[in-house]
Amino acid sequence: MREKYCEADLNEFKVNLFPLPAPQIDKWSTEHIDLTETRIKYHYQTYCAQYRFKLLNALVNEFKPKVIVCFGRGYGYIEEFKLAFWGEGSPASLTEIEIKISERNIISVLSSNYATKLIIALFLGRNLTADRDLKEIAENIKNIILPDTVGFQSSTCL
């Protein structure tokens, strides 16, 4: 993965808003406490918002990507994505479009006249339709990024 997402001359970059995995508030373990020096997960999230998100926003301002694709657990992270990639305050003329992928999956496209577009999709998990849904999400993202491209083929790697 390092070769694909962490080279300076590539068009892709992968990063986690909150790099320590702890999907639920009650899953904050002794190891998390040792690494973050806090017993409360919320303090870790606040630290990331104050320092890590500012770094991510500075990178967006420097490199000016057209689109950032965000995956998260539920739409509770939309505000965190906006803060991390757009900084304080929402851009002017903000629009949100929802695209229904399946009964369980919807992607949201947040855009403005001058800001990087944010495409937000839920984690698909391990359900029977995940592969089909992932291909549909990829097709929709391709159409958002390259709306005038005809005959472009996308591939999905799992």
Image (spheres, helix red, strand yellow):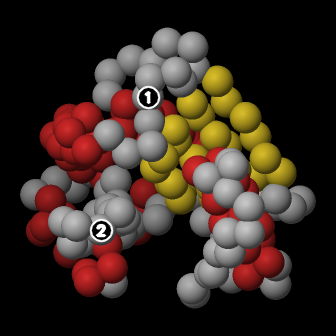
* Image quadrant where residue 125 sits: bottom right
Which image quarter is the C terminus in? bottom right
Q: Nearer the viewer, residue 123 or 65?
A: 65
* Image quadrant where residue 93 sits: top right
Q: Earlier in the sequence, mark 1 or mark 2?
A: 2
Q: Nearer the viewer, residue 39 or 126?
A: 126
* Image quadrant where residue 90 sits: top left
Residue lying at 45% horizontally and 18% vertically, measured from the top left = 91
Query: Where 157 sits versus 20, above or below?
Result: below
- Image-based side of 156 in relation to 64, left or right: right
- Image-based side of 112 in relation to 57, left or right: right
In the rendered image, which residue does mark 1 sit on?
A: 115
Inspect this view and state whether residue 67 appears. Answer: yes
Q: Secondary structure at mark 1?
A: loop
Please provide percent x and percent y for residue 48.
24, 46
In the rendered image, which residue does mark 2 sit on?
A: 10
Please provide percent x and percent y for residue 38.
16, 53
Please provide percent x and percent y for residue 126.
68, 82
Inspect this view and state whether residue 20 appears. Answer: no
Q: Identify the residue at the far top of this view.
A: 92
* Amino acid type, label 1: Ala
Q: Secondary structure at mark 2?
A: loop
